[in-house]
Image (cartoon, rainbow, N blue to C red):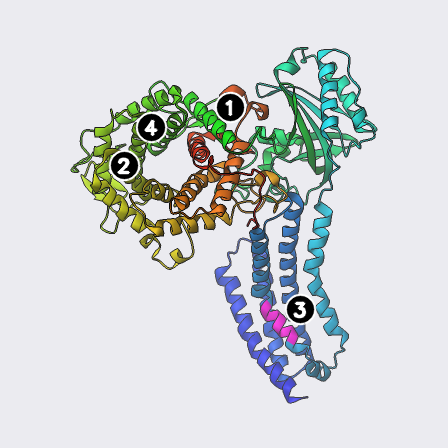
Amino acid sequence: MHDLTRRTLRTWAVAGVLYAAAISWLAIVYIPWKTPVANAAVVAYAAFHAAAAPGLWRGRRWGWRLALVGGLLGLLAAVVVTAGLLASWAYLRAIYGDFGTGASLAALIFASAALQVLGLYPALLVRALLRREVRADMAAGRGLASGVMSILVIPVAAAALTFQTFRLDPEPPVDARGREQAVRHLLAAAAGTDRPDIPALRGVPVGPGPVFVTLWDQGRIVARVEGVGVDLAGAVRAAADALADEPAVRPSAPSAGYLRIDRIVAAGPVASEWQPVLGLSVAPGRDGLRRCRDGRCRTVLPDDLVRARRFGAAPLIPGIRELRVGLDAAPVLDDIGRSGGRLQRIRTESWVSFDGAVLPVDRGNTPPPATGTAAWRRAAIEGGDFILRQLRGDGRFHYVYDPVTGRHPAGGEYSLPRHAGTVYALALISGHTGEPRFRRGAERAIAWLGDQVPERCGQLEGACVVRGGEAWLGSTALTVVGILEYQRRTGDDSYAARARQLAGFLVEMQRPDGDFHHLYDVRRGAIDPAPRQMFYSEEAALALVMAHEVLGDRGFLQAAERALDFLTSHKYDDFLGHFIYGADHWTCIAAEEAWPRLRSPRFLEFCRGYAGFVRRIQYQPGHWNNDDFSGHYGFGAVMVPQAPAAAGFSEAIVSSYALSRHHGRPDPALLRQAEISLDALTRDQIRLDNAWIMHAPLVARGGIRRSLVEPEIRIDFTQHAASALIRGAAELQREDLTPNRTTGGAPL
């Protein structure tokens, strides 16, 4: 036996004992014994390595074989786990389309981490035992090494097979002429008149079928029929026959509601009906599910899932409420049955007829009527009108509106900061449009807010907004912002004295470093330095900037400058702060509001850095096959992006661009970032033509949903969006905007 072989075997004998001891300790002490079989398997694996150690030390062939088998078992386990991770990536890629650079990198990092943690020791052991000299002394052939290396192709093969198995290959879409002919034919059938021919659909494949035709009115399904045929024209004719026979369809019904056509263009299997897997097996808003047996299917269309609030409603894994991602699969399986045939994922092509127009539908949305500054202004006004419809008789706002039911769900404690922020939005819209209804709405809301301000704030000189014996900084700061925006836009100084007192409270809450305490305990008459809330310091900075501009007290400007100096520098003095940004959108609004009174170049550089940071999670046009994500912010394709993120970021980006122009350095990247984000808000806003699942489209009109697949409307969603849209329309109207211009960069 060669000396190299002896040293190698003895080294790995010692390593094997240490490795076995470490693995056993982890399995016995640290890994919970919820599944004893798994713990026992890990201990048995460790024992395998320990048993091989004596044979390796003595140079016995049986020890070499035992150690090699143990190493191969560990390496195989690592390969299987890695294959599972890569197959999961491929599965999600097949479901959702472009997965995103960041999400793909994260999946690969997880896979590499699993390979290293689970497979590093076994891989090094196998490599050492299969060296040429060791194999020769152990009388092993060369083919053994080649066979071992072949298992490394398993992860790649698993990923490729998974992608091909679960990827859908949809039929080509129907052109505009075919859509219009199909709608005219169906409307004539519903009205009981002569049906025009549909030559554009002759010879067009039906797809996996059938074709569904649904008549919607006030958010409810008046009638739903199916049609099958040798081609799409035949399927539409069959659906028209069924629609004409529906007793619920009156001749006037189609003109009063919405006629929607769903053509199933692809169908394929799902990996499992286990809830966590099935929850991630449906592309929200684009896919439905069906269970078929003996030619009969029970089908749930994409609209049905959105209308039933099946997305973002339940934890993907029971017990982890924060992980509300994907489809709430359990009630869907109850609807279509948990047995009785194979479950399939279906992809639909859809179009809707409303008010004489035939519009394509993507993820429950129709194309926007326009883009650019005029469209943003109209959208802001629509948002403002929605807010006014939420204004109660006492001056408070309904916080949540459910457009599917037309109701206002009971909420928790009323939010004073969001009330004040909504006043700010109404005052902005009033000032930019001159429409008196927005001024009247702001006046009513301010009057209610004034009743929440006592004559004194405990032991402090200033006044504050109190709720439950506590005065939070953010409530008072946004109250100042709302009142002063109203005064600035209308010239009404009725609330100036109260605003001055409230701004005085903010000054008293400021710390020596420029930051603020966030809570004043009115009952104890003392500041509580411990609690911290997002946005409060930034909102206070904006309030002080505006207090100086509107009320003229230079002390407010000095306090605002200290606040902005802190927020753009010392706030990030910790180690992590050198690499990230936080909730800074109010900071950049304040920095722009302060111009030209405060001209620090650092404010501009900070806001450009912040904008660049969030731009890395903005979906860029031309780099994503989910075109409806364009301009929004998010991570990958698994979650449909939420409009509140685009609304809040857009407010800051509009201000950052304006600040760059003030400094004589207009930044085209900021301009483009703001433009596509404001277009996204306009595109996703509720309009009459995309409101067929809603109980009262005229009431929901102008509202901003959480996302295209989560219909809940909150007052702060709409308030932030309306503020961003009206400011963007005013600030960017002087620019030469090209709505379809694209820039480089891929989304994360």
Residue 639 seen by the camera: yes
C-alpha span from label 1 to label 3? 63 Å
Mark sitting on residue 294: none
C-alpha span from label 4 to label 1? 26 Å
Return the residue at label 3: 72
- Residue lying at 31% horizontally and 54% vertically, measured from the top left: 570
User: Closer to the camera: disc 1 or disc 3?
Assistant: 1
Mark 4, Cα crowd under 10 Å, few <14 / some 14-19 / many 20+, is: some
Under circle 1, the secondary element is loop
Return the residue at label 2: 549
Mark 2, Cα crowd under 10 Å, few <14 / some 14-19 / many 20+, is: some
Q: Main secondary structure of the magenta part?
A: helix
The amino acid beneath tag 1 is Arg
The amino acid beneath tag 2 is Glu
What percent of the width, then of the height, locates residue 722? 44, 31
Segment colored magenta: 120-127
Q: Which circle's residue, 1 or 2, is located before the other in the chain?
A: 2
C-alpha span from label 2 to label 4? 13 Å
The amino acid beneath tag 3 is Leu
- In the image, 216: left or right of 167? left
Under circle 3, the secondary element is helix
User: Closer to the camera: disc 2 or disc 3?
Assistant: 2
C-alpha span from label 1 to label 2? 35 Å
